[in-house]
Amino acid sequence: MFELIKEDIKAVKDRDPAAKSTLEIFFLYPGVKAIRMYRRAHKAYLKGHTFTARRISQKAARKTGIEIHPGATIGKRLVIDHGTGIVIGETAEIGDDVLIYQGVTLGGTGKDIGKRHPTVGNNVMISAGAKVLGPIKIGDNSRVAAGAVVLKDVPPNSTVVGVPAKVVKQDGKKVAAPLDQIHIPDPVWQEISRLEKEINKLKKEK
């Protein structure tokens, strides 16, 4: 466990230009504290000490604003940036070298039994406010945009955006145009044009 924590700290140091020292990261970064306490809770959970595990995880949630169920499976070098409002469910699985921003939920839909939470591959980035729900898979090297709501599997090497989330890039190539919120057709103008055509048609018939 100590080696895992060392790797977690190094990952933060490598990714966060604001990090000044190992001591600062270890003592003052809420994401690192949450992961550190999760690893203790998870160890107790695996030994069947579920009450102790939950007590540690709830203490971590109060201290950091990050709630990680002790039953979740988390790989190496997870970086939680800022972290407030993150929720990770019991059957969630997270691979190595994953980056998660504030307000992210790896949760369930309430419809599933057993495996209820997402599986996140290696080298995945989940941006602020994203919700990944249900026993779905996020492929390796993928990116989830801020505010996205992901309800279906995401292929490896993909970027997903929107509500519900859709793949807009895969293997470095665009696969769908993102919604153009500037050049959306004006429904009022469309209706006026339709009425004008109808009027002109009636005039011709006379």
Image (tube, rainbow, N blue to C red):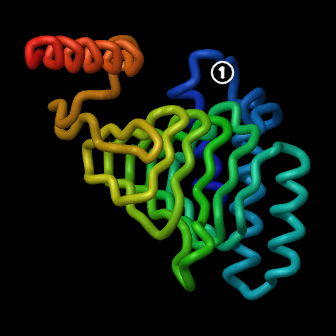
How many discs mark residues in the rendered view? 1
Residue furthest to the left in view is: 204
Instruction: Point out residue 42 in the picture as x, y percentages from the top left corner.
Output: 69, 70
x 70%, y 42%: residue: 32
> Is 6 in front, or is 93?
93
Q: Is residue 70 left or right of residue 173?
A: right
> Is 90 in front, or is 163?
163
Give the secondary structure at mark 1. loop
Instruction: Point out residue 5 in the picture as x, y percentages from the top left corner.
Output: 64, 50
Q: Which residue is mark 1?
A: 19
x 75%, y 65%: residue: 40
**Does 64 sit above or below residue 37?**
above
Q: Is residue 149 left or right of residue 20?
A: left
Instruction: Point out residue 12 in the picture as x, y percentages from the top left corner.
Output: 59, 33
Quarter of the picture containing the C terminus is: top left
Quarter of the picture containing the N terminus is: bottom right
Amino acid carrying mark 1 in the image: Ala
x 49%, y 63%: residue: 118
Q: Is residue 194 left or right of residue 205?
A: right
Residue furthest to the bottom in view is: 48
**Does 189 sit above or below residue 175?**
above
Crowd around label 1: few <14 · some 14–19 · many ≥20 (10 Å): some
Q: Is residue 121 left or right of residue 37?
A: left
x 89%, y 46%: residue: 63
**Does 2 sit above or below residue 114?**
above
**Does 137 sit above or below residue 144?**
below
> Is 197 in front, or is 154?
197
